[in-house]
Image (tube, helix red, strand yellow):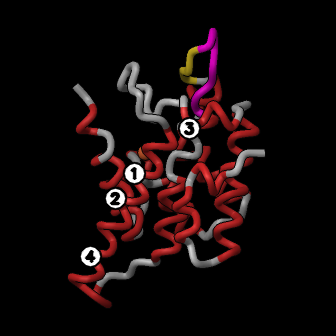
Amino acid sequence: MCDIVKILPEIDLIKDGELRKKVIETWEEAIELGGWSCEDLDKIPFTLLIPETDISIVDHTRAVTRTALAMARELKNSYGDSIDINFDHLIAGALLHDVGKLLEYGRSDGKVGKSYAGKLIRHPVSGAALAFKHRLPVEVQNMIAAHSKEGDFVKRRPETIIIYHADFTNFEPFRD
Ligand SMILES: [Fe+2]
């Protein structure tokens, strides 16, 4: 099995040991179900919408997590108790927001593209399903399920709103 904490060191920022364990186990299962190896992780592109991007899903996940954390700290500094942010949930949700891409993507002829499952179920849904299976808090499931357009139909938690914007901030500048 891969050393997920070495790949995603931000996991260690989660204070709750049980939550940390669930994040690691969710990543491990996604890697296994997607048929990936540990070495693949650095080569899986973070998006298929930017052809030939050299930003991997790991680079993106770590950057979104750190961006979300910086946003949350500033919001907390500015608004104190007026804003309800659970930092452990935020970090877990950011680290897992795209974990479903390990199922949405697959490899054929050495190239990464949409898998058959990915054509039927997008990563916010498969990621939330995995998080449900691993008993992550429903707030973290909300962050995964609602960090994209799927979330237009449900209430977004404050942490989800932060991840939603951190995610786009780590995507739009790299588009043509
Ligand atoms: Fe993302």
**Tag 3 residue:** 101
Residue 118 lies, in percent from the top left, at: 58, 30
Amino acid type shown at disc 1: Ala
Q: Quarter holding the C terminus?
A: top left
What SS does tag 2 mark? helix
Cα separation, mark 1 vs mark 2, equals: 6 Å
**CB under 8 Å between discs 1 and 2:** yes
**Tag 1 residue:** 63
Query: Residue at 47% of width from left, 35% of height from top?
Result: 56
Q: Quadrant of residue 30?
A: top right
Is the CB atom of the residue marked by disc 3 within 8 angstroms of ligand 1's nearest atom? yes
Residue 109 lies, in percent from the top left, at: 63, 9
**Tag 4 residue:** 75
Left or right relative to 73: residue 124: right
Task: State the residue in front, 49 or 73.
Answer: 73
Label 4: how many residues lie within 10 Å, few (<14), some (14-19) or many (20+)? some
Amino acid type shown at disc 4: Leu
Residue 14 vertical position relative to residue 142 in the rendered view, above or below: below
Query: Residue at 40% of width from left, 20% of height from top?
Result: 52
Cα separation, mark 3 vs mark 1, equals: 16 Å
Left or right relative to 108: residue 122: left
**Tag 2 residue:** 67
Query: Residue at 63% of width from left, 14% of height from top?
Result: 108
Left or right relative to 151: residue 105: right
**Image mark for residue 29:** none
Cα separation, mark 4 vs mark 1, equals: 18 Å
Q: Which residues are magenta?
A: 104-110
Residue 166 lies, in percent from the top left, at: 33, 54
Is the CB atom of the residue marked by disc 4 within 8 angstroms of ligand 1's nearest atom? no
Q: Answer whether residue 107 is magenta in the image.
A: yes
Cα separation, mark 2 vs mark 3, equals: 20 Å
Nearest to the eye among marks 4 and 2: give it: 2
